[in-house]
Image: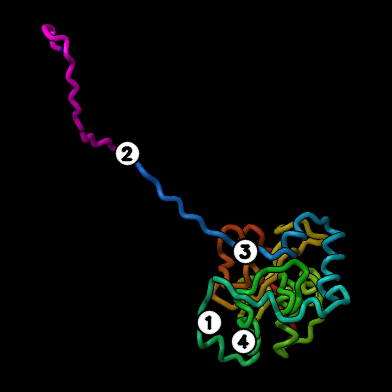
Amino acid sequence: TDPETGETETHYYTYEVEVPYDYHILTVTLTNTALSQIAATDLNIEQRELYAVYMETLGNKPYLFEGNFYAHPGPYTDYDIPPEALADETFAALIAEAERYLGYPYVWGGSRPSTGFDCSGFVCYVLDNSGVYPMSRTNAQGIFNQCAIIPRGEAKPGDIIFFTGTYDSSGPVSHVGIYVGNGMMIHAGKPIQYASIDTRYWTEHFYAIGRLPY
């Protein structure tokens, strides 16, 4: 303001100020879980056994399960079987059948490609449909009961590997997979894939190695 005239002049100035700041990028990965698996999480042991029967019989309405709508393989952990292991024709037939379902989602009570597989459903189906061993549908404990127990150090490709305490099961054996050698197995995880049995989780839950007469 001019003290003599009383006039006021207004001046505008523009400043650019650099202010340091941190920024973070959030990466989100979405996964898909089958509805049947979600439903099974709230069931008790008895209800899960009934649900497994439902999945085995397709609720007496097999037309609802046509089209193999579970057969949408997603990302999975793969593994190259050593050629020397595949020289065993029995094991080669077994693993060829098992690898057809890599990437299929885990589905509680599932026992065929059209429904998806749980761990015992996968092993039973592969054994039976590979022609290696006639195995009717049973749970992990039922498979264990048909095996001869083998020292872990003597395990060979094609043996069956069992785990305990992976969930609140009615028997000591709660999970099962097919041993492929070199500390690896193929099993119905999330999804069906290969896994190392030497990780902390599987080491803590290891139960036994079994061998079927084939």
| Dot 3 and dot 4 residues touching (CB under 8 Å) | no
Distance from Cα at disc 4 to Cα at disc 1: 11 Å
Q: Nearer the viewer, residue 173 or 30?
A: 30
The quadrant holding residue 164 is bottom right
Distance from Cα at disc 3 to Cα at disc 4: 26 Å
Q: Which residue is mark 1?
A: 81
For residue 96, which numbered disc appears in the image? 4
Q: Residue 195 appears at what percent x and percent y?
A: 57, 69
The amino acid type found where label 1 is placed reads Ile
The amino acid type found where label 3 is placed reads Asn
Q: Is residue 168 left or right of residue 87?
A: right
Sequence-wise first label, 1 or 3? 3
Sequence-wise first label, 4 or 2? 2
Q: Nearer the viewer, residue 176 or 137?
A: 137
Tell me the magenta residue range: 2-21
Point out the frontmost of discs 1 and 3. Answer: 3
Sequence-wise first label, 4 or 1? 1
Distance from Cα at disc 4 to Cα at disc 2: 55 Å
Residue sitting at 79 percent across and 59 percent down?
169
Sequence-wise first label, 2 or 3? 2
Q: Nearer the viewer, residue 29 or 88?
A: 29
For residue 21, which numbered disc appears in the image? 2
Q: Residue 108 appears at what percent x and percent y?
A: 75, 66
The amino acid type found where label 2 is placed reads Tyr
Point out the frontmost of discs 1 and 2. Answer: 2
Q: Which residue appears farthest toward the top when viewing the image?
A: 4
